[in-house]
Image (cartoon, rainbow, N blue to C red):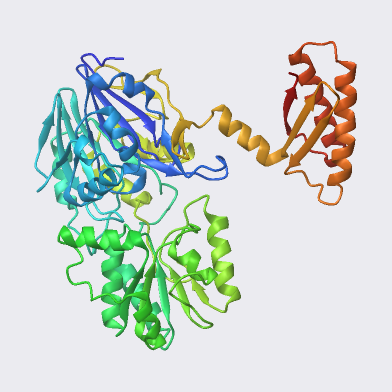
């Protein structure tokens, strides 16, 4: 699909879900990609960690793809880069902090020399075919969160990326209301906008508020060891915790390799310069309990992260009864069970758990309704295009935009082709979209036979049958709830399969395999109520 004399938009990921952001703009025969993210797997994909957008559409069009522009360094915006950038074969563009984290990913994947990575410093304009691009700094929960102002022959696009409003951002200098109003004064065709927090009736809050909240909370726990868990990528929060440690007379210790990497990257880009000298976990454990502040990864319940291992007693950092863990992060939907499991383990040990529901120790990095309304009034777009949200978030933002005076709002989801200009803007077609998974070392379709079968096995178990022409049958099962009755089930299933094969001894191999499968499955259903997957191996030499 080659764009004509028009301006197109198509999301391959991130529209209809939170995460996995991949956005495309098409104009005068060329495509531009904004972000290349991934998401983490849940129970939907057993045995899988990472989920990607299916890029088949743009892979087929890569001869016309000019480049990939990255708004910021969160995994849902850059996480798929090391898996697809080399194959797409186009340059990457990013600001310094994002570029260093991306370069580290490319180096780890062994493809750093094979991918062209451009560092856009000082927010200078650059041109890719018909697209003129300028980074516009906005506040977010990571260093160098940026919007993109995209100039095209058919109008300007303000692509927000992830953002919020913050009067005390701690790290970086976001664009002011006057600067955003000036952009609006020059005319904006379309505002492509983050929908994540549209149901929040209040502003998201400031990192300055979090600093004061964390300072007050840590002060309450004199003589106790305090651990704070937060997103490793939140450089502003790390700066805040360094300041809190100094204010409360505590030594700062970090636990988690991703924290070490972010601190090193941040300092190389000019951030975190006045972070206090860190102490290692062993030294921290030798300090008086009230003299240490620990920062740890794992606030989303990740089983291999530092906090999970600490809660299990499998980490150099130890917590005892009366110590305190502050969850300075929001609970990402889908992670509730894992987070609750860790919090329960800590509580059982007598550790005090404090979340943002009890104390003002976290604010979101995404805009609430008042912030969205403010941005509409400054940018004054002709069209609002909600992205970065589930269907309900994007539908609600479309309603909010119209109610706030935006002339037109276009709802779209992954795979929808939207014409923004000229003539009447709206959806006019669909392209292939979907999900891929990283399954072991293989990127495979999320709806492929392997994942479907794994779900079935997880739900119902599996029975294996082996038989020969002499009437010997062996049956084994995994995942059936037959601990006490297993041996009796196996004997009955063997008899059933042998009888079925004897009756079908003159049939062809395929038919004999099917009667054996059905006999074993019926036996399993009688004994367990489950309908397992059945594998049959006929030895008929």
Q: Quadrant of residue 410?
A: top left
Q: Quadrant of residue 187?
A: top left
Q: Is residue 213 above or below residue 385?
A: below
Residue 65 in picture, x, y percent from top left: 23, 24
- What residue is rendered at 27% in x and 32% in y? 86
Quadrant of the image containing the N terminus: top left
Q: Quadrant of residue 128?
A: top left
Residue 278 in picture, x, y percent from top left: 27, 75
Q: Is residue 364 above or below residue 373?
A: below
Judged left or right of residue 105, residue 125 is left
Q: Nearer the viewer, residue 179 or 238?
A: 238
Judged left or right of residue 103, residue 516 is right
Residue 389 in picture, x, y percent from top left: 42, 41
Judged left or right of residue 501, residue 81 is left
Q: Is residue 172 above or below residue 455?
A: below
Would residue 117 be visible to someone looking at this image?
A: yes
Q: Nearer the viewer, residue 171 or 421?
A: 171
Would residue 206 be visible to someone looking at this image?
A: no
Q: How many marks?
A: 0
Residue 417 in picture, x, y percent from top left: 36, 21
- What residue is rendered at 42% in x and 89% in y? 223
Q: Is residue 26 above or below residue 266?
A: above
Quadrant of the image containing the C terminus: top right
């Amino acid at each position: 699909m080659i764009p004509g004399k028009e301006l197109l938009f198509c999301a391959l990921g991130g529209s209809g879900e939170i995460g996995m952001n991949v956005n495309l703009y098409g104009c005068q025969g060329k495509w531009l990609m904004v972000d290349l993210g991934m998401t983490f797997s849940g129970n939907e994909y057993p045995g899988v960690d990472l989920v990607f957008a299916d890029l088949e559409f743009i892979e087929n069009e890569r001869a016309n793809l000019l480049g990939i522009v990255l708004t910021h360094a969160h995994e849902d915006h850059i996480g798929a880069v090391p898996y697809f950038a080399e194959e797409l074969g186009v340059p990457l563009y990013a600001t310094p902090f994002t570029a260093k984290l991306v370069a580290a990913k490319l180096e780890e994947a062994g493809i750093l020399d094979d991918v062209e990575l451009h560092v856009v410093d000082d927010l200078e304009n650059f041109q890719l075919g018909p697209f003129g691009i300028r980074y516009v700094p906005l506040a977010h929960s990571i260093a160098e969160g940026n919007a993109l102002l995209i100039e095209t022959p058919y109008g300007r696009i303000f692509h927000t990326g992830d953002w919020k409003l913050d009067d005390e951002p701690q790290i970086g200098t976001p664009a002011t209301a006057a600067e955003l109003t000036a952009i609006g004064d020059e005319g904006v065709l379309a505002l492509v906008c983050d929908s994540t927090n549209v149901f929040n009736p209040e502003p998201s809050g400031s990192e300055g508020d979090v600093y004061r909240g964390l300072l007050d909370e840590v002060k309450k726990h004199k003589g106790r060891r305090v651990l704070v868990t937060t997103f490793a990528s939140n450089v502003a929060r790390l700066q805040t915790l360094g300041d809190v440690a100094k204010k409360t007379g505590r030594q700062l210790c970090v636990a988690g390799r991703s924290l070490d990497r972010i601190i090193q990257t941040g300092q190389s880009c000019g951030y975190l310069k006045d972070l206090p000298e860190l102490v290692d976990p062993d030294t921290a454990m030798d300090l008086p309990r009230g003299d240490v502040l620990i920062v740890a990864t794992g606030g989303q319940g990740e089983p291999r992260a530092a906090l999970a291992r600490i809660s299990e007693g499998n980490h150099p950092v130890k917590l005892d009864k009366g110590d305190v863990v502050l969850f300075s992060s929001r609970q990402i939907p889908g992670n509730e069970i894992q987070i609750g499991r860790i919090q329960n383990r800590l509580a059982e040990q007598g550790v005090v758990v404090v979340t943002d529901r009890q104390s003002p120790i976290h604010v979101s990095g995404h805009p609430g309704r008042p912030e969205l309304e403010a941005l509409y009034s400054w940018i004054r777009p002709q069209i609002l295009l909600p992205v970065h949200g589930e269907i309900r978030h994007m539908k609600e933002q479309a309603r909010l935009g119209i109610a706030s005076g935006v002339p037109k709002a276009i709802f779209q989801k992954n795979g929808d082709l939207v014409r923004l200009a000229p003539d009447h803007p709206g959806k006019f077609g669909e392209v292939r979209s979907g999900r891929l998974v990283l399954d072991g070392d293989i990127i495979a379709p999320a709806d492929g036979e392997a994942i479907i079968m794994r779900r079935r096995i997880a739900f119902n178990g599996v029975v294996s049958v082996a038989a020969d022409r002499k009437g010997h049958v062996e049956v084994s099962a995994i995942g059936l709830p037959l601990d006490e009755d297993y041996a009796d089930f196996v004997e009955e299933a063997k008899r059933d399969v042998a009888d079925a094969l004897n009756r079908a001894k003159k049939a062809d191999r395929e038919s004999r395999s099917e009667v054996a499968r059905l006999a074993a499955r019926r036996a399993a259903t009688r004994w367990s109520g489950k309908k397992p997957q059945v594998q049959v191996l006929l030895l008929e030499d």
